[in-house]
Amino acid sequence: MSDFCQKNISKLELFLQQNDHFVVTTHNNPDGDALGSSTAFCYFLHQMGKTCTLVLPDAPPESLSFLFYGDEPFSYFSLTDKALEAEQTILSAGALVCLDFNGLHRTKCGEFIRKATCPKLLIDHHLDPERENFDIVLSQTQISSACECVYQALMALPQISNQAELLPARTAYALMTGMTTDTNNFANSVYPSTLRMASALLEAGVDRDDIIQKIYFRYRENRLRAQGYILNEKLKISPEGVAYVVLSRAEMEKFDLQEGETEGFVNIPLSLDKVCMSILIREYPDRYRVSIRSKKGTSANMWARMCFNGGGHENASGGNLDRTLFADASQVEEYVKSAIAQFFAS
């Protein structure tokens, strides 16, 4: 039975009707899908006459700041900036809305969510959602994004009745933004439902040209120079067709790369015919963050699970490596080589 059946939509309707103050949250290092689905839901709650607070585990990247207008009818802050307030806000919530993560381990707010005694809703598109931690779960994996999940849920509510023009304008704009970023502008994870969603939102008046301008045509010069450096100096391709890049912290600082500015780099090598999978690894103070993308027929998810303490979607996954296990980035490259051999031998 689909999570988006009438029974669960009725539960969602009661959840929204019976509670007055909502706290919305998402995963660590929120990306376009996380911020798009979160802000979209907050605007929808405001239209219903509810009060809402958005608690982010980390501050949003500057590249996605356009999703915040400065006159939001809801308050928002990050746990990074206000850890005590984040805990108190979540624990005192009338209801919790959790978006774009499948388990509490994917958010720094996880323990606060676990302790909270209020009703909890999860809307997500990743594999294996932790259903036991939520009262209502709306999960769909064969879908473009969490934004599309939220879109389908809201469209099914009686007050919307599949009429996208009845969504708040900022909700529609945010949903289109998150879906666009999570599909890499319709390059991956695109389903018939994704195109139907895009068409309906365009008909409802969403300015997609404005979204594209703000996502893809507002980069700083340093990002372009970093991209050139990566392609010329860092990119390696294994005989098996795996492209890999390991960026040290020093290299990221050299180009002043901020959170979100490496978004999309991992997809570039997939333009090569001989490349079936691409991996980008970035050094952070406590870990190496891993992004993996693959072409159809090669499982990024399986490799993430096998070798990088992660997972995700079949062709778009991520993970982490413990920084203390490696002396420097060159050792991480050696690990990647062994992981490639292990994956293709399995």
Image (spheres, rainbow, N blue to C red):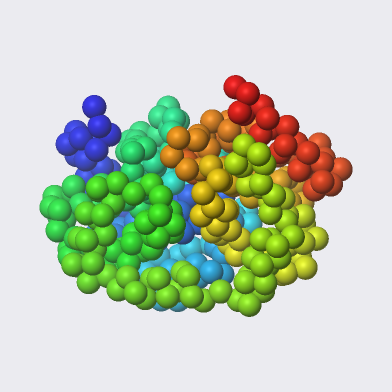
Question: Residue 71 at what x, y percent from top left?
Answer: 41, 76
Question: Residue 59 at what x, y percent from top left?
Answer: 58, 61
User: Which residue lies at the image location 24% right of the left edge and 51% below the top edge?
Assistant: 154
Question: Residue 6 at what x, y percent from top left?
Answer: 17, 36
Q: On screen, 165 above or below 189?
A: below
Viewer-nearest residue: 120 or 199: 199
User: Which residue lies at the image location 33% right of the left edge and 62% below the top edge?
Assistant: 176
**Residue 28 in sight from this viewpoint:** yes
How many callouts does the rendering have?
0
Viewer-nearest residue: 311 or 118: 311
Question: Residue 166 at what x, y percent from top left?
Answer: 17, 63
Which residue of the protein is positioned furthest toward the right in this rendering?
A: 327
Viewer-nearest residue: 144 or 100: 144
| Occupied quadrant, residue 207 | bottom left
State left or right for residue 156 relative to residue 133: left
Viewer-nearest residue: 303 or 282: 303
Query: Which quadrant holds the C terminus?
Result: top right
User: Which residue lies at the image location 51% right of the left edge and 49% below the top edge?
Assistant: 273
Query: Which quadrant holds the N terminus?
Result: top left
User: Which residue lies at the image location 60% right of the left edge and 41% below the top edge?
Assistant: 241
**Residue 117 in sight from this viewpoint:** no
| Occupied quadrant, residue 204 | bottom left
State left or right for residue 203 relative to residue 263: left
